[in-house]
Image (cartoon, rainbow, N blue to C red):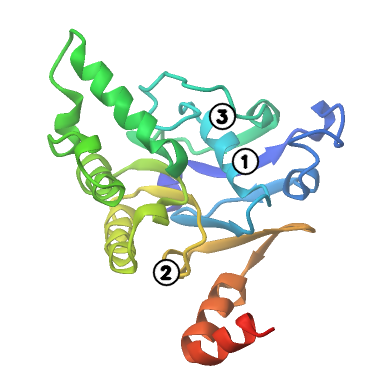
Amino acid sequence: MLASQFVFHLALQRDKVESFERYPFNLAAVRTLDRLELHPKVTFFVGENGSGKSTLLEALAVAMGFNAEGGSRNFNFGTRLSHSVLHEYLRVAKGFKRPRDGWFLRAESFFNVATEIERLDEGPGGGPIIAAYGGRSLHEQSHGESFLKLLNERFGGRSLFILDEPEAALSPQRQLDALQRLHALVGQDSQFVIATHSPILMAYPDAWVYRFDADGIHRVGYEDTEHFRVMRDFMADPGRSLRDLLAD
């Protein structure tokens, strides 16, 4: 599997940073970053909102040639320039094999990607792009349905997938479906780097989980994540959890 790994690690070129007092370098995850190893199959970034996991994920995606708002490397559009300059300060160690394909998913801008697909299909050129996504407009489906179409129809083997909160539109059952598809793609020599809040997704066996917190980035076991502990405790006794939470 190591022979097919597309990204081995990423490192911050600290000597190029003029100040760690300004964004995004003032984020603990970036300020303390030296070198971060990635699993050859699946790596998860987890942490609270604002911890820097999506910022680092975005920087990796842009450094790997993906459009900042999402899509494959063939997408080149922008509805609002909002990504940080962090990608300019990253050194990414790549494998000797290049991925056959890949995709950068951002839950918050997936609507923009769907719109861009329709815009491209309205122009001159080859066959409709939407055919690779099941042939039906992604705007004519729910967010969850369109993401599953992307996962099942567009994603393929020997590819690099960088996903930011893919669970955002998925029910628990659909998250399990997504996990099953992820496993199939891993078996076809694909590599995933995923930022998530989902205890279901991050349960994928043998994956590496990195926790982003006020002290930086730490590799932890799945059952040591706050996401797992909170969900376990709540489901063990929802009544008591709610009484404690809602008590005056």
Residue at the far front: name it: 248
Q: Which residue is mark 2?
A: 200
In the figure, is residue 4 to the left or right of 225? Answer: left
**Image quarter of the N terminus:** bottom left
Residue flagged by tag 2: what amino acid is it?
Answer: Ile
Q: Position of residue 189 (x, y in %)?
A: 34, 49
Specify whether 4 is left or right of 12: left
**Quadrant position of the C terminus in the picture:** bottom right
Measured along the vertical axis of the image, is residue 109 above or below residue 194? above
- Neighbour class for label 3 at 10 Å: few (<14), some, many (≥20)? some
Distance from the alpha carbon under mark 3 to that under mark 1: 12 Å
First reached walking from the N terminus: tag 2 or tag 1: 1
Could you tell me which residue is drawn at 23 percent across and 37 percent down?
138
Q: Residue 37 location, x and y as percent?
A: 61, 51
- The residue identified by callout 1 is 55
Q: Which mark is residue 63?
A: 3
